[in-house]
Every structure is written in C-alpha cells, then in structure tokens.
C-alpha cells in the first residue's frame, strides 16, 4: 500500500500544483519519487510530529492540500491536539497518512500497535477516515480525497497486501463496496482497511462463514453514519471485522449509527482485536491469531 500511495500521489500532484507532502523523518525508500520530482512541495519536518501538523495546517490555510506521512501512531496520537484544533476545527485540507495500521509493526511492540487510531480520529466531527483494503482501494481513496479536500485520515497497511479488486472502484463516504458476485445470501462480512486481508481467507477456512457475502467500507466517519441504516436493512446478519480494539472501533461506529433504529442492532456481530495484543510483541500474523481473528 505504501508504494501505491506514493505512486498515486505523484500522479495526482502532476496535475494539482497545490499537493504537498510533509514527512516526519521517515519513509525513506518510499517517498523519493515525490521528493525528487516535486522538491519545492516536499518537506522533512524531522522527528517533530506536532510541528509537522501545525506546518501542514498553516500551508493548508494558504491553499495547499497537505499530506503528512509517518508510521502508525506517530502522526496521530503524538499530535492529537494539533489535528483536533488546527486541522479538524478549521476544516482544512490536511490528510494524515499513517503507515502500518493495526499490527503491521507488531514486532516493534505497543508503541507501534495502531489499534486505537480509529477511536481517536472518528471522534473528530469533520474528519473523514479513509481505510483502503487493498492497493486498488488506495488509489480510489486518494482520488476521492484530492477531488474532495477536507480533514482526512488515510490508514495504510505496510506492504504486500493482495489486490482484491479487478479495477479501481468508485468510492464515497458511507458506501459499501461488494467483493462477491451478486447472490441470494442474506449474510455479509463488512470490513474496513487491511482487515480485508483477514476476511477473504477467513470465509474460505471457517465452515460457519460459508455463504457469506463480503463488503468493504473504505470511507467513513461521523457525517456518514446516517447512511448506514439503509445498508444494514439489506441483510439479516452483518459481521464487522477490523484490526482495531472493539472499543471505539469500526464495529462500534456502525452500532452507534443505528441508535435511532435499535431493531437493526441485533443484526450486527462485531469481530475485533482482543486487548491481549496490547501487551504482546510479535509478527502481524502471530498477534492477529492471538487476538482470535485467524486460526
């Protein structure tokens, strides 16, 4: 996903002079195509994420669409106040890019476990969460964000994610994307972000999942809650799957969206990470397995 992100950013920046990239002294081996081609729109802010976000907000107020880029929790939790007060409050076109969502950097320990980031970012009223499930969804989300500049959070996997879409899909906030052929099933699994990589083999391996459809929701946030009841109405059973803690996560967000339609809540089942992973160090697959999401 990292390489797809930078490739799409370069393509978009070629026709959008207002696109800028700021990094927190990370991303080497990935960001060079942008830095080399657009040196006047690339800044390394150093290991100073709060300054990076404040700088991005200032540039955004002058007409730039700024992408800030760093690993996991560094561009989010480390500068939460700047995101809340400088970016979201003023509705500025800053896209916070976090690489290694979920447990992608699990072998570096809890400081790099991005398992509470949805909880932080989705409580901001103007923030759009972009959580692509494969490289094609990365391109789709990037194109939407550039066409609709606003406060946004782009949560990427680390590398090696399988391509699940044949073409770049059309995405919009709150819109579910189908990854299975049309069928008569009344049950579906709904994922967001890199948990799509868990869901596909999960359906194939677990007998009780046989016959489930599969959907992703790449763009969501507080404003798009109102669209969810009409989507849930189409299904007798919806299982949400995410590489995030259940508290404040994607499944919790979907339950909240149905608060005025409580009769629909019983149709939902939430699969999320167990908090046991917060005290563990290991590979992504090892930790996801320990959390109970894969065999």
Image (cartoon, rainbow, N blue to C red):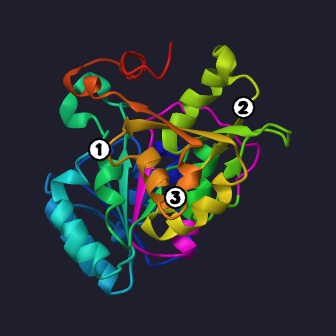
Q: Choose the circle earlier in sequence order: 1 or 2.
A: 1
Residue 212 numbered tag: 2
Q: CA distance from mark 1 to mark 3?
A: 22 Å
Image quarter of residue 233: bottom right
Seen in the image, is 177 located left or right of residue 125? right
Q: Is residue 244 above or below residue 278?
A: below
Return the residue nearer the eye: 88 or 122. 122
Q: Secondary structure at mark 1?
A: loop
Towards the viewer: 114 or 261: 261
Q: Determine whether the residue tagged by mark 2 lies in a helix, strand or loop.
A: loop
Which residue is tagged 3?
258
Q: Which residue is mark 1?
A: 116
* Contact check, label 2 and label 3, Cβ < 8 Å: no
Magenta segment: does it hold 160? yes
Q: Earlier in the sequence, mark 1 or mark 3?
A: 1
Instruction: Specify the principal SS of the magenta part.
Output: loop
**Mark 3, secondary structure of its residue:** loop
Range of the magenta residues? Answer: 144-169
């Amino acid at each position: 996903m990292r390489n797809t992100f930078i490739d799409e950013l370069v393509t978009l920046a070629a026709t959008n002079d207002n696109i800028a990239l700021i990094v927190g002294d990370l991303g080497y081996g990935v960001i060079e195509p942008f830095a080399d081609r657009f040196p006047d729109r690339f800044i390394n802010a150093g290991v100073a994420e709060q300054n990076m976000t404040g700088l991005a907000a200032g540039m955004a107020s002058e007409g730039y669409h700024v992408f800030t880029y760093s690993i996991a929790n560094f561009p989010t939790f480390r500068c939460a106040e700047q995101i809340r007060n400088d970016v979201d409050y003023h509705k500025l076109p800053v896209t916070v890019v976090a690489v290694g969502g979920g447990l992608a950097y699990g072998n570096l320990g809890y400081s790099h476990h991005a398992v509470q980031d949805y909880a932080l970012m989705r409580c901001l009223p103007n923030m759009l969460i972009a959580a692509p499930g494969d490289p094609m969804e990365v391109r789709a989300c990037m194109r939407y964000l550039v066409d609709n500049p606003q406060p946004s959070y782009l949560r990427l996997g680390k590398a090696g994610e399988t391509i699940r879409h044949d073409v770049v899909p059309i995405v919009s906030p709150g819109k579910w994307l189908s990854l299975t052929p049309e069928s008569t099933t009344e049950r579906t699994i709904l994922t967001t972000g890199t948990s799509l990589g868990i869901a596909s083999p999960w359906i194939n391996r677990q007998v009780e999942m046989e016959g489930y459809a599969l959907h992703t929701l790449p763009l969501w946030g507080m404003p798009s809650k109102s669209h969810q009841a009409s989507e849930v109405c189409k299904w007798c059973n919806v299982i949400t799957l995410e590489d995030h803690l259940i508290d404040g996560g994607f499944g919790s967000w979907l339950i909240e969206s149905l608060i005025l339609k409580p009769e629909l809540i019983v149709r939902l089942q939430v699969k999320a990470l167990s908090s046991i992973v917060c005290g563990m160090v290991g590979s992504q697959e090892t930790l996801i397995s320990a959390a109970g999401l894969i065999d």
